[in-house]
Image (cartoon, grey):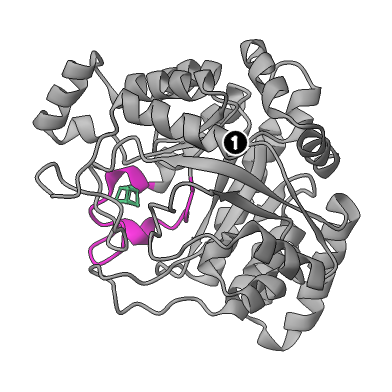
Amino acid sequence: MAAEEWAGLLAAETLTGEVLAAAAARRDASWGRTITYSPKVFLPVTNLCRDRCTYCTFRKDPDDPDAWTMRPEEIAEWSRRGRALGCTEALLCLGDRPEAAFPTYRHTLHVLGHRSTAEYVHRAACIALEAGLLPHTNAGVLERDEMARLRSVNVSLGLMLESVSPRLRRRGGVHQWAPDKEPARRLRMLEAAGELRIPFTTGLLLGIGETFGERVDTLLAIRAAHRRHGHVQEVIVQPFRAKPTLNAGATEPGVLDVARTVAVARLLLDPEIAVQAPPNLLLSTEQEVLLHAGVNDWGGMSPLTPDYVNPESPWPHVQALAETCARAGFRLVPRLPVYGRYLAVPGWVDPALRPAIERCAPGPSLRAAEHAST
Ligand code: SF4
C-alpha cells in the first residue's frame, strides 16, 4: 500500500471496525492469544537533560529541587529489591547528554569517576547485572561507539523515534528546543543499532503535532530500517498525555485514534515486530480496545518503581491487567527485555550476557518470549 493509503486508514473513522479486525487477525496469526509484559525496575540514572521538549515533566535543570542523579549505591539497592520482587529488566532511562549543558553535572560525573553519561550508564548496567537483572538502556541519542560499548552490558537498547516530522523542530513545535529530537539524528541511531546487531525498541509518540501522513512516514522508516537489519524487536505506540507544561492545553489523542494507529502499525510492520502500548496511560476499557486492535505487548511494568516519565499514571496491577486480557480472550505472561528470536541466533546478544539471561529466564518467561517471536 502507498503511504497515502495507510494515512487514509488512520483518518477513516468509518472503517475503524474493519481495520481493527484485520490487525487483530494479523496479530493472532503471528503472536497467538498471548500478551506479554516485562517485569522491570525503572532506574532514572539522571533526570538532567540538555533538551527541552515542551511536553516533558521528566527533565530537570541542576538547580531544580527534584534534580537527581542516582548514586551507584542507589542503583544497586533498587536493582536488588526489584530482583527480589521478581523483576527481570533494569530499564535505564535518562535525560539526553546532560554533560553537554551543565558544568555541575560534569563535576558529578568526575566525582563518580566518569567522563560521560554513557560511561556512567555502562557502570550502572554492570551494577544491575550483578544484582541479577537484564539491562535495557534508553539514554537518548547515543553515538555509535557508545552503543558498541553498551551492547556488552545490555540485552537490548531503545530510542523512541517519536516522529520523523522535521516540522516539530521548528519555531512553536514541541521539539523546538530539543536538538536531540532532530529526526535525522534519531534515524542514524536506529540504523547504527541495526549495523551493530543490537535488538532495538523504538516507537511513536502520538498527538505532538504530527499529521497522519507523518505517523505513517515514521512507521515506514522503522520498517525500512528493520528490513535492512532485522533488529527492531518492538514498536511502542504511545499517546501523548497532557501535563502541567508548556503545551498543557494540547489535545490528547482519543482511544480510537490510538487504536487505529496500533492497527496500522500492526498491518504495516513486519509480523515479527511486537506492537506495544503502555497500559498505565489507558483505562482498562481502553486497554481492551487496543487488544482488539492488534496490540500484543504492554511493555515494562514495575512492582517497585513508578513510571518516572508519566508519574501521575501508575502501572496497573498485573492481576487486574491479566483479568482485562482474559476478558478479551488473552493470556498475560511475563517476558524478558530481549525477544526470543535474538537469543536463538548467535551474533545478536553478547555471549557474556548468556548466564545472566539463563538465571533470569524462568521457564515460562523464556518460553513465552520464544513463542512470541517465532
Ligand atoms: S522527553 Fe527526553 S529528550 Fe525531551 S526533555 Fe524530556 S528527557 Fe529530555
Which residue lies at the image location 76% right of the left edge and 48% below the top edge? 270
Instruction: State which quarter of the image contains the N terminus.
Output: bottom right
The relative height of residue 276 versus residue 96 in the rendered view (above or below) is below
Majority secondary structure in the magenta region: loop
Give the vertical position of 9 relative to 38 (above or below).
below
Question: Which portion, as a residue range, is magenta?
Answer: 160-182
Quick check: 113 above or below 270?
above
Residue 133 location, quadrant:
top right
Q: Verify whether residue 57 appears in magenta.
A: no
- Left or right: where 122 falls relative to 217: left
Is residue 168 shown in magenta?
yes
Q: Is residue 10 left or right of residue 63?
A: right
Residue 157 makes an appearance in the image: no
Q: Mark 1: few, some, or many residues within 10 Å (few <14, many ≥20)? A: many
Question: In the rendered image, which quarter contains the C terminus?
Answer: top right
Which residue sits at x=25%, y=47%? 51
Which one is in front, 222 or 203? 203
Q: Where in the figure is residue 105, as x and y percent of width and height?
A: 16, 30
**Which residue is at a point 83% across and 74% down the rendered structure image?**
21
Q: Which residue is under mark 1?
A: 200
Give me the residue at 57% from left, 63% from top: 316
| Rendered location of residue 325, percent (x, y) | 76, 65
15 relative to 372, above or below: below
Q: Quadrant of residue 297?
A: bottom right
Secondary structure found at label 1? strand
Foreground residue among 241 and 200: 241
Q: Amino acid at mark 1?
A: Phe
